[in-house]
Amino acid sequence: MEITYATAPTPGTAGDDYGLIGDDWALVLDGATANGLPTGCTHTVRWYVHQLAAHLGTQLAATTYPLPEVLRVAIADLAVSHGRTCDMTCPDSPSSTVAAARVTGDQVELLVLCDSPILVLTHPGDVLVVTDTRTQHLPGYTPADLSKLRNTDIGFWVASTNPAAADRAVTRTLPRAEVAAVALLTDGASRLADHYGWSWEQLMNTLLDKGPREVIRLTREQEAIRSPARGKANDDATAIVIRL
Ligand SMILES: [Zn+2]
């Protein structure tokens, strides 16, 4: 197995993405940008993302729990770690997307929570896209709307303080023999397909042929020419490619 990784924060910022790689697993996280509402938490989004990565990495390195169980335990343990100082019931507590892949024996397990997609190149040469599209169909997008919709079944789910989010993640398990490669992307690294007219096949092929770093460079090139129809002019971008 070969794993390649590139990440680039929004120019001029430290960034809230995080990537983590083990022997047979990898994950990317994308912290939700603070929206100005009180969070009930004394910590930053960046702190939350780094802590979540550490908790997930501990589970992935030391257990064989299914990915939703890994995520549930990580969210729960992390909530305990700041539950004494912070309000775990605040819907605007720091949060993060999760995209994770693990190769076990003869299977490839995938998990996506919120808008960090996974692409899979199968052995016949098809590109399979694993996405959680709930954030694309919300009744409103103001900070107040998102506050009401976050981690509810009428809205969307994200890793934050409620371990139940793990059970709402999108999961797929594929036979290892059918998988040639897997790419984990934060939405800043999927913009060529989401906003700039590329097909998922083009994006996956470029990730494999030229590498994650080049995909991020091409994304920045597009962002300099025109802002996406929705969202920020630039975004943190992280991509991990696993070749089996
Ligand atoms: Zn906190």
Image (cartoon, grey):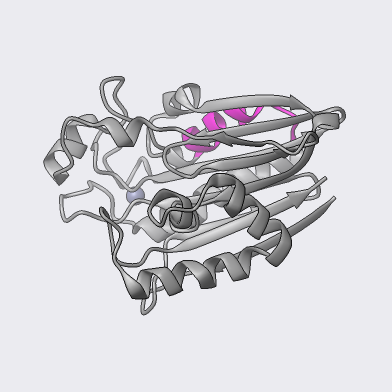
Q: Quadrant of residue 220?
A: bottom left
Q: How far from the left and from the top, in percent, is residue 158?
A: 39, 36
Left or right of 190? Residue 126 is right
Q: How far from the left and from the top, in percent, is residue 73?
A: 56, 31
In this rendering, is residue 61 above or below 212? above
Q: Nearer the viewer, residue 28 or 162?
A: 28
Q: Nearer the viewer, residue 132 or 47?
A: 132
Residue 147 can be seen in this image: yes
Question: How many discs mark residues in the rendered view?
Answer: 0
Left or right of 41? Residue 239 is right
Residue at image position (57%, 65%) is: 215
Query: What is the magenta segment's predominant secondary structure?
Result: helix
Q: Nearer the viewer, residue 182 or 22?
A: 182
Q: How far from the left and from the top, in percent, is residue 62?
A: 75, 39
In this rendering, is residue 55 above or below 158? below
In this rendering, is residue 133 above or below 223? above
Residue at image position (59%, 57%) is: 239
Q: Quadrant of the C terminus?
A: top right
Q: Quadrant of residue 91?
A: top left
- For residue 59: magenta? no
Q: How far from the left and from the top, in percent, is residue 218?
A: 51, 70
- For residue 68: magenta? yes
Residue 59 can be seen in this image: no
Residue at image position (34%, 74%) is: 225
Q: Which residues are magenta?
A: 63-77
> Can you name the residue that lies furthest to the bottom here?
12
